[in-house]
Amino acid sequence: MDKKIAIFPGTFDPFTLGHHNIVTRGLKIFDKIFIAIGNNPKKERYFHVDLIKKKIENLYANNSKLDVINYNKLTASLAKDLSANFILRGLRNTTDFEFENSISQINKDINTKLETVFLITSPNLAPISSTIIRDVIRYGGDINKYLPYNIKQDEK
């Protein structure tokens, strides 16, 4: 039987409790998950990608089913490179669904072996988004209760 390999792509700026929840639940479904930190030219990062990668790697250091990688290409192409047949995505609301559904259809067109699996975010985590977290920290708020690791105010 083929291994079920998934990519969990995102900019993860920062990686939140919501992301962590999706990964934890995804581990019950998949044999291997690549947390793939992508470069989105439309977004200017708040936290340096190397810092976030290190935080995520430390979080899952004892889990051999997870790898954290950086990438700068189409997610469908990355899936081919990694022999992954699944993309794992979390959905907080119907707006997320509309956006993610369109992307999944294009990914399927580019890579016909690719299936997108959507997990509904746990209700208590649904209001958390990386965008909101960045706003909180920009104005001096403590964001650590929204993250599965600690980050300092001046750590970027």
Image (cartoon, grey):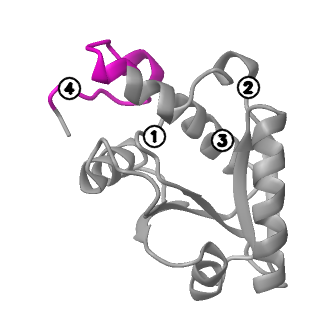
The crowd level at tag 1 (other Cα within 10 Å; few <14, some 14-19, many 20+) is many
Give the secondary structure at mark 1.
Answer: loop
Residue 14, image x, y percentages: 41, 39
- For mark 2, give the secondary structure: loop
Q: Nearer the viewer, residue 76 or 103?
A: 103
Quick check: 77 left or right of 50? Answer: right
- Mark 3 or mark 1: which comes first in sequence? 1
Q: Is residue 17 visible?
A: yes
The amino acid marked with disc number 3 is: Ile
Q: Where does label 1 land, which residue?
A: 15
Type of amino acid under label 2? Ser
Magenta segment's dominant SS is: loop
> Label 3: which residue?
22
In x, y percent, where is residue 50?
26, 56
Measured as percent of width and height from the top left, residue 123 is found at 75, 19
Left or right of 36 on screen, residue 89:
right
- Numbered circles on residues, count: 4
Mark closest to the chain's N terminus, 2 or 4: 2
Measured in 3D between alpha carbons, the distance from the residue under mark 2 to the one under mark 1, in whole angstroms, is 16 Å
Residue furthest to the front: 42
Q: Position of residue 39 (x, y in %)?
A: 43, 64
- Magenta segment, which residues? 136-154
Which residue in the protein does label 4 denote?
A: 152
How far apart, in angstroms, are the residues tagged by discs 2 and 4?
A: 26 Å
| Residue at point 31%, 41% (across, down) | 46
Question: Closer to the camera: disc 3 or disc 1?
Answer: 1
Residue for badge 2: 122
Q: Residues within 10 Å of mark 3 (few under 14, many from 20)?
A: many
Q: Secondary structure at mark 4?
A: loop
Q: Quadrant of residue 5?
A: bottom right
